[in-house]
Image: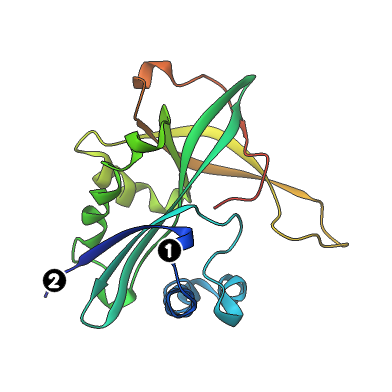
Amino acid sequence: MRSDIRWRLCWENDLQLADHAELSDFFRKSYGRTGAFHTKPFEGGRSWAGARPEFRAIGYDAHGVAAHMGILRRFIKVGEVDLLVAELGLYGVRPDLEGFGISFSLSVVFPVLPQLGVPFAFGTVRHAMRNHVERLCRGGLATVVSGVRVRSTLPDVHPDLPPTRLEDVLLLVSPIGRSMDEWPSGTLIDRNGPEL
């Protein structure tokens, strides 16, 4: 049975301590199924893993947080081109709601993106998510781009690890203020910061 979702679109400064605690619990439950390592950033009431979002879409139902998407404006470098984007990340759907089409309702964030003054929205996902994100892209909201590696800084400094990591991921690119034809070509994206 599909849950009725009520969406809250809010700036990061609008969140209270109770909101962060509830989101932290949501992320630990949602991401914990892929390994305990993925829950560590959300310990102690923290509701972000790498870069902190500036804007959030939080879906609620009768049981609390049902879904989440974070947004952060930033410059990335695609090949040699500096490009302002709205990075989409911190995506999650509560485990008991997976398969009920909740992720399609995340399109609630797309009307907000033009207000951010960005030419594109950009996000990354693992290759294992390809079928899922291609279903989301069917309506023309975004395009899946493959064959691009993304370099990011680690959110914390570790003496035994390099300060950056290079990932082979799928990109989701959504044209906001420009057409998809204007997305720069390039096989390397420098995020120049931690992923959202």
48 left or right, relative to 171: right
Tell me where residue 120 appears, x and y as whole percent: 41, 31
153 left or right, relative to 181: right
Amino acid at pointer 2: Arg
Q: Nearer the viewer, residue 64 or 135?
A: 64
- What SS does tag 1 mark? helix
- What SS does tag 2 mark? loop
18 left or right, relative to 93: right
Tell me where residue 190 appears, x and y as whole percent: 65, 34
Q: Which residue is mark 2?
A: 2
Task: Give the residue displayed 44% in from the left and 68% down from the top.
Answer: 15
Amino acid at pointer 1: Asp
Q: Which residue is mark 1?
A: 14
Q: Residues within 10 Å of mark 1 (few under 14, many from 20)?
A: few
Q: Nearer the viewer, residue 96 or 67?
A: 67
Tell me where residue 124 appears, x and y as whole percent: 48, 45
Residue 41: which quarter of the image? bottom right
Q: Nearer the viewer, residue 195 or 22?
A: 22
Task: Give the residue displayed 48% in from the left and 80% down from the top.
Answer: 21
Give the spatial CA distance, label 1 vs label 2. 28 Å
Task: Give the residue displayed 59% in from the left and 79% down from the top.
Answer: 43
Name, please, the residue furthest toward the left: 1
Tell me where residue 55 appears, x and y as whole percent: 43, 53
Q: Nearer the viewer, mark 1 or mark 2?
A: 1
